Image: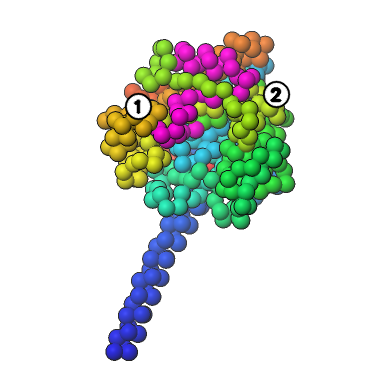
Amino acid sequence: MKNNLKIIKIISLVIALAFAAIAGRDFYEHRHFMEPVVPSPSLTEVKKLSDYEPSLKGTVNDSNVYVFDSGVPGGTALLIGGSHPEEPAANLTASLVAENVKVEQGRLFVIIRSNRSASTCTRMGEAYPDFYHVKTPWGIKRFRMGDRCTNPLDSWPDPEVYLHYPSRQMLAYMDIRNLNRTWPGRPNGAITERTTWAMTQLIRREKVDMAVDLHEAELEYPVENTIVTHEKGQSVAAMTSMVLTAELFEVPLSMEFSPQALHGLSHREIGDHTDAMSLLVEVAEPMIDRIRGITDEYLLMTGRDEFVMKAGEHKLLYAPIDERGWPIDVRVGRHSSTFQKMLEFYSLESPDRPIVISGVPGYTEVIENTLGAYLYNPEEAPEHKVFYD
């Protein structure tokens, strides 16, 4: 009997070690995976966030900053993707812009993965896929799925209450790791605060005129398919909302003002602490709804879920959904056209500092041809033209 128990214990230990080895391999692969980026020929420089906050040098959040300078005097825009890596349409749109844009006048800065740390883990207990894949004419391109907040391996422990700087507003403990709760940041804070501080310094030093932060939200969230704008961006947001709703988008794009008493968010703090106008854009992502079915790559990429549809039938949602779902091409297409239309109206409003771009596919093109048609093969690009995020 004792021998049998020993054998059972040994077998159990071997099985446990095998599972631990498999999990460890998957964990390591996800944390260290790098996404190739092939920027457009308009690229003039690649900076790092550590150029603006040196303490980030060598850390996981020393993200690439892609600079596209036309050489023609004009204004400067910043496009921020990847604030919340569980919202992939944001970083995919930033990639789409970086790989296709031609800047005709002014300058454009693009950050594809603003919180790289948050893309090295997924939300605990949610069974998110580690990776998702986009079909292209040259094969399958792989991307990291992420979490809403910075990886605890890079920022630990959390305080019992997060005291936002400089407002001293009390926020939830995990918000010290939430990039969109730590603006404008501080140079001596936790890594997420230092990351937003670096971007705030970028905006100040580079004299950014307009900063746009891309996001996705669950359909149960009231601020859905919406531009949230600081007072400085009121006219740009209003005109963009009206024109795209009337002329292009099947689902309306609304506009809301940034709450003055709610601190830490990009649309409030960038406008308050820099000279730039700040806007944030939300689009629907059914995978992060509470009422949903299997949380897998199919749901992430197609946005189709019968449970979310049923919630809509019971009027529990703030965005419509039917059997077509919310495919990634629709979500990226909306973000792309919204950003481009914002630049158009900003330039009309500021003729002395226009920002003019071309070459970026919008809503109609991305839906008709798919996102993958506009992503370039890193194996066919010159080595010095491929970067990694």
Confirm whether residue 176 shows in the render: yes
Question: Is label 2 in contact with label 1 (beta carbons under 8 Å)?
Answer: no
Viewed as shown, does residue 307 lie left or right of 186? Answer: left
Residue at which label 1 appears? 320
Residue 105 in percent (x, y) is at 61, 17
Q: In which quarter of the image is residue 260?
A: top right
Q: How many marks?
A: 2
For the view shown, which residue lies furthest in the bottom direction? Answer: 2
Residue nearer the viewer, 320 or 94: 320
Quadrant housing the N terminus: bottom left
> Which label number is shown at residue 275?
2
Residue sitting at x 67%, y 36% = 184
Residue 4 in percent (x, y) is at 29, 86
Give the extent of the magenta segment.
215-244
Residue sitting at x 42%, y 61% = 23
Residue sitting at x 71%, y 38% = 166
Q: Distance between the residues labelled 2 and 1?
A: 36 Å
Residue nearer the viewer, 36 or 279: 279
Residue nearer the viewer, 20 or 365: 20
Dot 1 falls on a residue whose secondary structure is: loop
Residue 133 in percent (x, y) is at 38, 41
Residue sitting at x 36%, y 32% = 316
Q: Compared to 298, does 10 lie above or below?
A: below
Q: In which quarter of the image is residue 136?
A: top left
Q: Quadrant of residue 374?
A: top left
Estimate how packed mark 1 is, as few (under 14), some (14 to 19) or many (20 or more) residues with alpha carbons within 10 Å: some
Q: Does the magenta stretch include residue 218?
A: yes
